[in-house]
Image (cartoon, grey):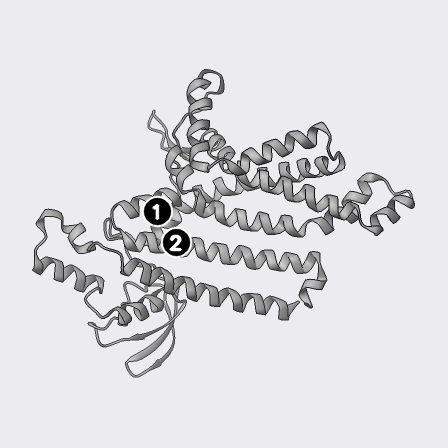
Amino acid sequence: MFRYTLIRLMYGILVLFGVVTLIFFLFNVLPGDPARMMLGQRADITSVDAINRDLGRDKPLIVQYFSFLNDVSPVSFHNTEAKTSAFYFDKERYAAAMQVLSIGSSTVVFKKPYLRRSYQSKRPVSEILSEAFVPTMVLATVAMIAATILGLIMGIISALNKDGWFDRISLIVSILGMSLPSFFAAILIAWFFAYVLADFTGLSMFGSLYTVDDFGRGEYIDLKNLILPAFTLAIRPLAIITELTRSSMLEVMSQDYIRTARAKGLSLYRIITRHALKNALNPVVTAVSGWFASLMAGAVFVEYIFDWKGVGVVIVDGLEKYDFPVVMGAVLFISVLLIIINIFADLVYGILDPRIRYA
């Protein structure tokens, strides 16, 4: 198991390196000059050059790339004397850094990944993302838990009642759920439940996890605003999990060992929980892990439509304002989360099916 885990971690690191490289070169060849965006009508050559020098954009692209790698890596290499260097060790920037090795003017540092500062607000990108992460995490987690539980239940019932009325209805619902784009579903759901039926549901078309009290008592958590965006996000993974569970259960229930268990007189509940479900879960785990990670990234449209103050809204605002560090940090953050979830899913596969560990 240790060797299997180590291999998966190495694959994850290689994928992360590729993602970091792709993100850097993608956003550094896009049109638009952040310095001119920041200055607006006051832009002149001297001011633009000064800002680009401050942002490090006056250096060759390859130097900027290695500087970016140095910033996002937890172990980085710096120069303690040359302040004009792209690798200068700025004690204010790396306040919590721990120097592990120093040779002359060169030092090796262990630190938190530095995602740089927003071009517009000058705030650290990590601080912006940490504020937006909690609402997005809550939204994605609630949606995924609901989709997983309902999907497993519906898939098992459909498999046990193949070609019955419930099976046919769940098939229709699954097809509709898979074919309906999330942004279109968000508009329809917001209009129907928060406008047409607003007097009955009491729900709002807009709102985030935190709401400011009208009577000056500060912010409070308003879970009512979570219902519609979570329901919207859960539709597609619910459809996928239902169909995967159904097809996997049908395949497992036709195996010889299930027939043997039935012949021994085991109850249907024990056959499903002890024998069938465990062997049918592998494709479902794949779907759940993939969809959970995609909900963290794919919630962009849903968050924007419902005005849910999460990572999705941060990405849209950053793109509108050419705030590249914010967008790069958000994409990198989502990529890391996706890699971690996939590694965790691989470890779960190894637990559910030991054959995978030795393949």
Label 2 secondary element: helix
Give the residue number, with chain letter if any, for mark 2. Answer: 331
Q: Position of residue 246 (x, y in %)?
A: 69, 41
Give percent across and percent down for residue 216: 33, 28
SS at badge 1:
helix
Tell me where residue 282 appears, x and y as whole percent: 66, 52
Q: Does residue 255 appear to the left or right of 346 in the view shown?
A: right
Q: Residue at x 23, y 73 (%)?
A: 85
Quarter of the picture holding the N terminus: bottom right
Q: How many marks?
A: 2
Please indicate whether residue 339 sits to the left or right of residue 244 in the image: left
The quadrant where residue 176 appears: top right
Mark 1 → mark 2, Cα distance in angstroms: 8 Å
Q: Which residue is mark 1?
A: 315
Residue 41 point in image, percent of width and height: 10, 47
In this rendering, is residue 105 above or below 70? below
Where does the C terminus fall, quadrant-wise?
A: bottom right
Residues at circles 1 and 2 in contact by the CB criterion of under 8 Å: yes
Q: Residue furthest top?
A: 199
Within 10 angstroms of label 2, few (less than 14), some, or many (20 or more) residues?
Answer: some
The disc labelled 2 sits on which kind of residue?
Val
Q: Earlier in the sequence, mark 1 or mark 2?
A: 1
